[in-house]
Image: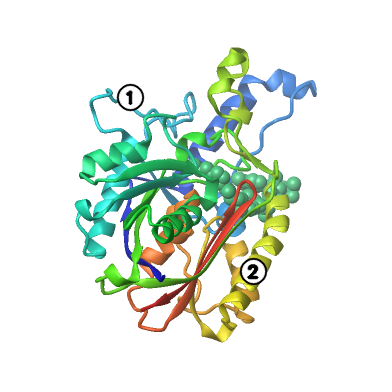
Amino acid sequence: MSIVISGTGLYTPPHKISNDELVGAFNQYVTEFNQQNAQAIEAGELEALKPSSSEFITKASGIENRYVMTKEGILDTKKMMPLTPQRNNDEVSIQAEMAIGAAKQALEAANKKPEDIDLIIVACSYTQRAYPAIAIEVQQQLGCGGWAFDMLVACSSATFGIMNASNALEGGTAKSVLVISPEIASPQINYRDRDSHFIFGDVATAVVVEKEETATSEHAFRILAKKPMTSFSNNIRSNFGHLARHTPEEAFEGDKLFVQQGRKVFKEVLPMVSKLIDEQMSLAGIEKNDLKRLFLHQANINMNTFIAKKVLGRDPIGNDAPIILNEFANTASAGSIIAFHRFHDDMVKGDKGIICSFGAGYSAGCLIIEHI
Ligand code: CO8
């Protein structure tokens, strides 16, 4: 049975924050902190905080901008977190709203109506609540039938979600699936941490996955090979969760936010991902020259260039391995799907590509696709 990705959608949040704006707020916080603690710093009891810089961020990561659902609070040195207004239970939740925006576009691109969908998978790094599932709320709002569930695998959620969709189609438990990744990554950032205050942005992506025999869209991509992998590591971690209330005095400590050993992640994840892609290419009988495009996870431009070079055996040129993280920052699992959404229109029958995600867990997911 042949499974295809037949439509994509992208929801872009309403607010933008440039590196300069973010660094301006961070450096103001640093000045205030160092002034308030001048005596302790002078006495050697406390270390002075160091300023951030837009040049460092662009050079080390490639990030220039990010979109956020809520800007209020992030740039306020007394708050340094998004102050997202609470919604009542009878209003559509913010994450479902983002998911619906992306899903509607994906349905249109795939020539599908909501009633054609009988499985919705919301696959992302965080859901705003444990239950009821965001996916079930989206199912009701869109008017889809069947069943729906949420799943979390950090940055690999979208590719793992597409693999789950494919398995459901092969197993006969669904006939058309929406995989949606509404990533609200901005609240998990420690905006007082120089090493990571710039990393994430918010976004939502969606794809329709169905059997080749039912696909009618102009751009449908057959999944030639699919492979997930995981290997436990504490180098990217957030301890946020419902058990945090058992130690209320620590419920809002820094370890509840995003924490990483960026250098270690860089070194350990690259060989893991390169090996996964190599193995999948051999399995699918694909050579490097057969590849039209690499849609890679968007965490760090230097990481993407390294992987693209390794897979292609040469420097990537033009749109070989498109980069969107300059505009969106790291959007967790949505990154590779944004690249796919933005850069597949010029692909034609027979063109092959790779969608590959990697991140916390560690986790990595590789899909080899071919335009039909
Ligand atoms: N401004 C100026 N200088 C800085 C700054 C800053 N903001 N930050 C650090 N520096 C300094 C450091 O202090 C250091 O100085 P020194 O050499 O004197 O010690 C120097 O710059 C170099 O620092 P680093 O070695 O840390 O810099 P790197 O070149 O390693 O770049 C990166 C840092 C950009 C973080 C890089 O390591 C990186 O991108 N690593 C890979 C990260 C990655 O891929 N992570 C996985 C993705 S995250 C993920 O999977 C998502 C999990 C769940 C998401 C949930 C979303 C909802």
Disc 2 marks a residue whose amino acid type is Phe
Mark number displayed over residue 26: none
Asked whether the residues under the numbered discs 2 and 1 touch, taking CB atoms below 8 Å apart as contact, a structural biologist would say: no
Q: In the picture shown, does residue 233 fall above or below 209?
A: above
Q: Quadrant of residue 62?
A: bottom right
Which residue is at 35% across, 82% downward?
348
The C terminus sits in image quarter: bottom left
Q: Earlier in the sequence, mark 2 or mark 1?
A: 1
Mark number displayed over residue 86: 1
Q: Residues within 10 Å of mark 1 (few under 14, many from 20)?
A: few
Q: Secondary structure at mark 1?
A: loop
Q: Residues within 10 Å of mark 2 (few under 14, many from 20)?
A: some
Which of the pair 87/221 is nearer the observer?
221
Q: Quadrant of residue 116?
A: bottom left
Q: Quadrant of residue 4?
A: bottom left
Q: In the picture shown, does residue 88 fall above or below 113?
A: above
Which of the pair 53/303 is nearer the observer?
303
Q: Position of residue 2 (x, y in %)?
A: 40, 71
Q: Write down the residue under mark 2.
A: 306
- Residue 100 visible in rendering: yes
- Residue 198 visible in rendering: no
